[in-house]
């Protein structure tokens, strides 16, 4: 899976989670939840959806690595290889 | 025979607009069946029945707006002697009925009563179109001429499916004849039973419509203003060491698939449900006095992205385990955000929880949702210095507040509740 494909999946699922926002405008080091105003419940649902779409397991202890667009993309790219 | 009434979905609800009947006369009903969809300030709500029986006849029509407590349908309870449906001659409650004009399109759907049918036949029925509001709305958006369609619904009413079929070209091709869709008739049926004062209303939309957020805001404003006006609140706060609970949560989540993982809110809900055991006076409503409730239905505050709140209930939370509570949240929260809740979820909360989640304020002091008598506020869990076993340590700390109705209970009761809540959260494996 390419980095572009991963980011495209992230943007698609973030848009579903927060339809009133533009996830593509996120800066790489911006905190996703804070920038898009996503609460704990929606954050978990977003990770569940990522897991279903990409088939990548995200253990709870790795949640910290999913905070920003950059770190989440890096994490998923690494796990997909 | 009994009457099915427009339910109250909260202290702030005064009326609801029937959008669509989901059952038809003659249908067998069992508890929990969805009988209708009603548009309220809190969105499109599925209305459930609570008794088994048979739907005998409609008393209001799709498009009608009626006050809380007004009869919507006649039900024959199981065991009640049968009765041949006949024209309804009872006095109906005040109804605000749509009054179709040229610019607004077709008239609202009609009921299926014989009286209605005969009245229709005697009027200028060629201009009258029987269609559900949903069908009209879809037709209008897609430029489908309703006069060209044959309805398959009750009494020949055009349904959503009829319009969709026409759009798919599977039925008659809609003919474009705007002049025939311009209907001037006002709805006359049952007019003699209604108040003379009618008011023009927009047809109800199938889901969130422009102004829905303002409407929710208004509902919150009404409920909170009433609370502040009528309820003498007292507030208590308890600082809870969450090390045990968070460790347990981490351990259990490590063993779970991501879709089965639990959020701290699940522990809060279950702990409140159990703590109520020791202080039942907090699981109650105030209605000319304290009325204790047997069921523990925990209202959970859900904030909407565009602003405003909804407070659906996790029913019988005391009998559900943590997995069942998480399942209930997974089902309820997305529906709440889509403004698609069920009547039972909005009507019978017995106590409310508000939880700020992660990375928010450390304390929240709630405003009681009337007619309830308590709201429990959970702040964000933060690492704080805490004395534990005589030693100062940094631990995850949760600030829990209780707002109680001082007419109903005293601070001592609230304090006992918070102490019980603390005890339950220290033993998460038993929740």
Image (tube, grey):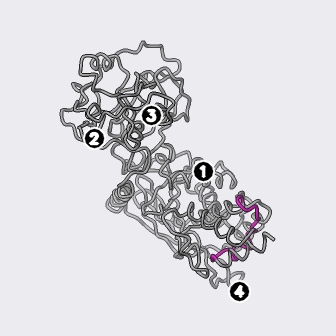
Q: CA distance from mark 2 to mark 4?
A: 73 Å
- How far across and how far down the image is residue B259, in percent? 71, 58
Region rendered in magenta: A52-69
Name which of mark 1 and mark 4 comes first in the sequence: 1
Label number found at residue B104: 2
Dot 1 corresponds to which residue? B331
Q: Are marks 4 and 3 in contact (CB under 8 Å)?
A: no
User: For residue A54: magenta?
Assistant: yes
Q: Chain of mark 2?
A: B
* Residue sitting at x 78%, y 71%: A79
Dot 3 corresponds to which residue? B163
Name which of mark 4 and mark 3 comes first in the sequence: 3
Label 4 neighbour load within 10 Å: few <14, some 14-19, many 20+? few
- How far across and how far down the image is residue B175, in percent? 37, 31
- Placement of B283 over or under B186, stated as above or below: below
From the viewer's perspective, is the residue at label 3 or at label 2 nearer? 3
- How far across and how far down the image is residue B401, in percent? 52, 69
Find numbered disc 1 in the image and state the secondary structure of the residue it sits on: helix
Find numbered disc 2 in the image and state the secondary structure of the residue it sits on: loop
């Amino acid at each position: 899976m390419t980095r572009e494909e991963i980011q495209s999946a992230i943007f698609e699922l973030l848009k579903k989670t927060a339809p009133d926002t533009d996830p593509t405008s996120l800066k790489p080091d911006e905190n996703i939840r804070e920038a898009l105003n996503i609460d704990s419940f929606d954050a978990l649902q977003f990770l569940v959806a990522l897991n279903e779409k990409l088939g990548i397991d995200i253990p709870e202890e790795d949640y910290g690595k999913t905070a920003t667009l950059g770190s989440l993309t890096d994490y998923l790219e690494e796990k997909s290889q | 025979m009994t009457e099915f009434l427009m339910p109250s979905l909260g202290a702030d609800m005064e009326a609801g607009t029937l959008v669509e009947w989901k059952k038809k006369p003659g249908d067998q009903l069992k508890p929990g069946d969805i009988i209708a969809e009603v548009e309220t300030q809190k969105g499109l709500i599925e209305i459930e029945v609570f008794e088994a029986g048979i739907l005998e006849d409609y008393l209001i029509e799709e498009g009608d707006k009626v006050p809380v407590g007004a009869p919507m349908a006649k039900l024959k309870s199981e065991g009640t002697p049968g009765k041949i449906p006949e024209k309804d001659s009872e006095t109906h409650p005040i109804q605000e009925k749509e009054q179709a004009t040229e610019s607004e399109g077709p008239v609202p759907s009609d009921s299926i009563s014989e009286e209605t049918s005969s009245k229709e036949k005697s009027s200028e029925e060629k201009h009258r179109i029987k269609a559900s509001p949903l069908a009209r709305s879809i037709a209008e958006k897609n430029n489908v001429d309703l006069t060209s369609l044959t309805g398959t619904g009750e009494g020949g009413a055009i349904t959503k499916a009829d319009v969709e079929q026409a759009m798919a070209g599977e039925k008659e091709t809609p003919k474009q004849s705007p002049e025939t869709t311009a209907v001037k008739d006002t709805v006359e049926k049952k007019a003699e039973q209604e108040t003379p004062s009618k008011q023009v209303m927009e047809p109800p939309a199938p889901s969130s419509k422009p102004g829905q957020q303002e409407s929710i805001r208004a509902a919150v404003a009404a409920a909170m203003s009433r609370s502040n006006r009528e309820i003498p609140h007292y507030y208590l706060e308890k600082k809870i060491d969450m090390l045990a609970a968070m460790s347990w949560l981490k351990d259990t989540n490590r063993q779970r698939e991501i879709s089965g993982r639990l959020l701290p809110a699940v522990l809060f809900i279950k702990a409140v449900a159990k703590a109520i055991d020791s202080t039942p006076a907090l699981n109650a409503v105030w209605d000319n006095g304290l009325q204790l409730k047997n069921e523990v239905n925990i209202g959970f505050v859900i904030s909407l992205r565009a602003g405003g709140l909804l407070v659906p209930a996790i029913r019988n939370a005391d009998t559900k385990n943590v997995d069942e509570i998480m399942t209930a949240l997974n089902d309820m929260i997305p529906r709440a955000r889509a403004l698609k809740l069920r009547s039972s979820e909005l009507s019978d909360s017995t106590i409310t929880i508000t939880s700020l989640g992660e990375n928010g304020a450390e304390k929240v002091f709630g405003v009681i949702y009337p007619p309830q008598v308590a709201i429990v506020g959970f702040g964000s869990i933060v690492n704080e210095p805490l004395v534990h076993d005589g030693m100062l340590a940094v631990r995850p700390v949760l600030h829990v507040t209780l707002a109680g109705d001082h007419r109903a209970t005293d601070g001592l009761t609230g304090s006992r509740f918070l102490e019980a809540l603390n005890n339950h959260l220290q033993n998460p494996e038993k929740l």
